[in-house]
Image (cartoon, helix red, strand yellow):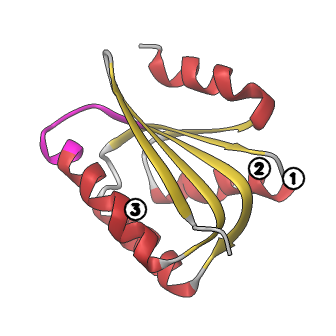
């Protein structure tokens, strides 16, 4: 069975870019791994931009969806940009689904456009 949350990378340039990689099914425990790090950056007043890379993504458990909803509600105004990078047609819909839950600018990129996603996140 694949681990839901598999990787976090932080890069600090003009903005703090957080890269999250999800593989398989994401559960509540996965959120407990990366949310404290994200909240630490937000609490430091950093400009946070997030790239979520979906690889063989199979969705969320109910507990993970609840954690995602709580995070989105609490940090509605704290994320500047969100890039969703995936390889399945339905994943493109996640960008549209996310927009009402954040003031962040949200865009979807195919996996082959990952470099473009990173450039978009890093530009001022």
SS for dot 3: helix
The tag earlier along the polypeptide, 3 or 1, is 3
Cα distance between the residues tagged 3 and 1: 23 Å
Query: Hey, which quadrant is residue 71 in on the image?
Result: bottom left
Q: Is residue 45 left or right of residue 70?
A: left
Q: Is residue 24 left or right of residue 75?
A: right
The tag earlier along the polypeptide, 2 or 3, is 3
The answer to whether 98 is drawn above or below residue 116 in the figure is: below
Residue reaching furthest to the front: 1
Cα distance between the residues tagged 2 and 1: 6 Å
Instruction: Work out which quarter of the rendered image holds the C terminus and state it.
Output: top left
Task: Say if mark 2 contacts mark 1, CB within 8 Å.
Answer: yes
- Tell me the number on the disc at residue 72: 3
- Tell me the number on the disc at residue 92: 2
Q: Which residues are magenta?
A: 41-49
Q: Is residue 10 left or right of residue 3?
A: left
Q: Is residue 107 left or right of residue 44?
A: right
Q: Position of residue 9 (x, y in %)?
A: 41, 38
Q: Position of residue 114 (x, y in %)?
A: 68, 29
Residue located at (59% from left, 57% from top) = 22
Cα distance between the residues tagged 2 and 3: 19 Å
Residue located at (18% from left, 49% from top) = 40
- Tell me the number on the disc at residue 89: 1
């Amino acid at each position: 069975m694949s681990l839901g949350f598999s990787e976090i990378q932080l890069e600090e340039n003009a903005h703090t870019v957080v890269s999250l990689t999800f593989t398989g099914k994401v559960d509540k425990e996965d959120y407990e791994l990366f949310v404290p790090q994200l909240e630490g950056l937000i609490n430091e007043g950093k400009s946070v931009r997030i790239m979520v890379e979906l690889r063989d993504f199979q969705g969320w458990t109910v507990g993970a969806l609840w954690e995602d909803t709580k995070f989105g509600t609490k940090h509605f105004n704290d994320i500047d940009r969100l890039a969703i990078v995936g390889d399945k047609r339905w994943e493109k819909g996640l960008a549209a689904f996310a927009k009402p839950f954040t003031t962040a600018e949200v865009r979807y990129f195919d996996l082959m456009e990952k470099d473009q996603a990173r450039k978009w996140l890093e530009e001022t």
